[in-house]
Amino acid sequence: MLKKYLKQILTIISLLFWAPEVALTAPIIYNWDLLVTSPQNTKFKTTDTGPVLLFSDSPEMVNKPGIMYKDKINGDARLFFHHVNDTKTLKNFSIVLYNPELKPVNITLNRRGVSKPSFDWLKAGQDVQVEYFAKYKPKNITIEPFSHIELLSEKSGVNFKPQQLITGMMDLHTTSDVEVTFLMSVPGSNIFADVDILPQLPADQTPPLRGTFKNANRNVQVINQYNGNNQQLVTLLADGVEDKFVWGIDAPTGKPAHNYGNYGIVYNVSYQTSGNVPYLFGFNTLGGYFAGVGLLKQQENEQLVMLPPRGLSMGATEKETLLFEMSAEDSKGNFIFSPPGSANLPIRLLFKNTHYKNK
């Protein structure tokens, strides 16, 4: 049992030592119903910017070898993938990049988080977020004309057992066109040949939970300011109504695609308080089970926080709320997160006075 969780424990410890000092107490999980009595929903405006997103999650349960998603990128791009081996034998998962041009293409690999094959789908999603939001060192690679490379292992992909999940999120920049293929194949096969031989697998829902989406960063500016009195401000995100899910194109069919959950979208929520008083910042898993991370930024400081801080997931009920007690000096802040694979949405952010213990 200890060996099973040793890597996660060491990862959390390393992140705690890495994070700069911030005016945060140790977070606790509290009951939403005991915290919030008459909430006021905040007004906010969103602006979508950033790289193009290639999102591969359909079919999620892959029951035969084939291509899950394929499209072309040029410039800044983000890849998000989430696939389970739903066959009865060992299979191989790979991401193949192909240079279709007469000149070499240079690729810069930036942030990335990739899970190991896992039966624990929630933990796999959280592992991706931990790695993605940690410090990173860019890496440069070159693909020669009319040549392939494999992105996950830089060799031949990764094998995974029946009912194991592989999920990940990667940012990269290309200097010209690159074809990207998400592929499940038989171990030992020539994946570069499989790209041209194996069939395109149909999506498992309509509109498909896969596609190519413009502007994969969502900047959320909370307009209402928490004033330090008896306000209980709530910001609801990734619900598909107040905070819209993005639409794109399913490249294999040319039909519209809808990213239910905004997976692969990086949120940067900016807010400001007034009154120069301490306050609570709360994170609530309204949608159900959730395992991820967030980046809390105040002034010039930032801290990566585990969601939840203990255990493998939170959200057994919609009432579970993670609380941070913020100092009076933290009047301007940002909360950065991305919906992890397998996690449930929507989520709520709470701004409230610090008298919750008397409730």
Image (cartoon, grey):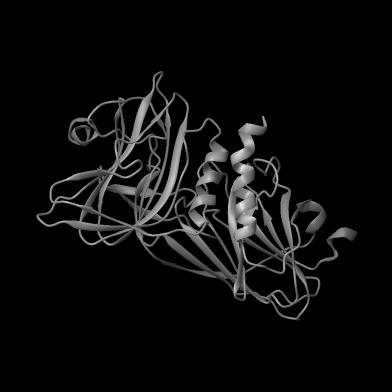
Residue 187 location, quadrant: top left
Q: Which residue extends farthest left?
A: 102
Residue 315 in picture, x, y percent from top left: 67, 44
Tell me the quadrant of the picture where the N terminus can be found. top right
Residue 268 in picture, x, y percent from top left: 53, 65
Residue 298 in picture, x, y percent from top left: 63, 72
Q: Which residue extends farthest top?
A: 88
Residue 50 location, quadrant: bottom left
Nearer to the camera, 19 or 308: 19
- The residue sitting at 50% across, 59% down in the picture is 135
Relative to residue 223, is residue 73 depicted above or below? Answer: above
Q: Relative to 302, is 246 on the left or the right? A: left
Relative to residue 212, is residue 313 depicted above or below? Answer: above
Residue 198 in picture, x, y percent from top left: 22, 30
Tell me the quadrant of the picture where the C terminus can be found. bottom right
Residue 19 location, quadrant: bottom right
Q: Which residue extends farthest bottom?
A: 275
- The residue sitting at 37% across, 42% down in the picture is 208
Question: How many numbered marks does the figure carry?
Answer: 0
